[in-house]
Amino acid sequence: MCDCEVRMVSRKLIVGLLIGLAVPALSIGIYFGFGFAPVATTDAPMWFESTLAKAALRSRIHREMPTRAPIPADTPNLAAGAKTYQVHCATCHGAPGAVAPAVSQGMSPAPPQLFVKMVTDDPVGETYWKTKNGIRMTGMPAFRKVLSEIEIWQVSLLLRHADEIPDGVKETLVGNTHSCAAADGVSSSNRRSAGPAVE
């Protein structure tokens, strides 16, 4: 093969490589740029959301999560965790014996109801990591700037022992939930009786 033929083959390979790179890039640009990507919470997730994102999350948590809690899972800590959970978590993740909060039904992915689909089999360090750092593309916020280290551990221990929490702690969770529901019902009733808002 002469030099001119070699150069011709090289050019064809380079052109083919450039086309092979340009076509997928252009397709992706059109897909996202013209609004075809599923961005609404009612849309089905893209394949990488449930595959690549979960794989990356598992690897990151496994690498960084602590292996043990620095505080015991005793009644005072579980009770404190219950109070923290009610203020910061129950709005999305629900409470024992309560129906799933309405706001959770409009989220994608739907937040797990942590007293129905419990995380008692997960290492407590995993729940701590998720609570502290949050999870992208799920609606789960990071609480590292909202809660103290002790508060994050207390709520993590509560969820680790959700199937065996003392009755007094459970009553705190259920009682607060019912109080909030009753207050919301009274508020809604007052709004209905007051008639439409004046603009």
Image (tube, rainbow, N blue to C red):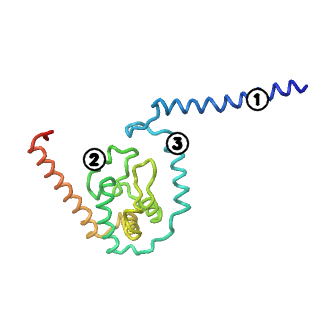
Q: Quadrant of the N terminus?
A: top right
Give, as a three-letter code, the residue at label 1: Leu
Asked whether disc 2 touches disc 3, contact meaning CB atoms under 8 Å apart, the reply is no
Amino acid type assigned to the residue bearing label 3 in the image = Phe
Instruction: Please tell me whether residue 125 is drawn above or below residue 106 in the rendered image.
Output: below
Q: Indicate which disc, 2 or 1, sits on the residue closer to the N terminus.
A: 1
Q: Secondary structure at mark 1?
A: helix
Residue where numbered disc 2 is placed: 102
Residue at 28% over, 50% down: 101
Alpha-carbon span between mark 2 and mark 3: 27 Å
Q: Quadrant of residue 45?
A: top left
Taking the view exactly as shown, the residue that stands out farthest to the right is 2
Identify the disc placed on residue 48. 3
Eye-nearest disc, 3 or 1? 1
Q: Residues within 10 Å of mark 1 (few under 14, many from 20)?
A: few
List the residue tagged with mark 1. 13
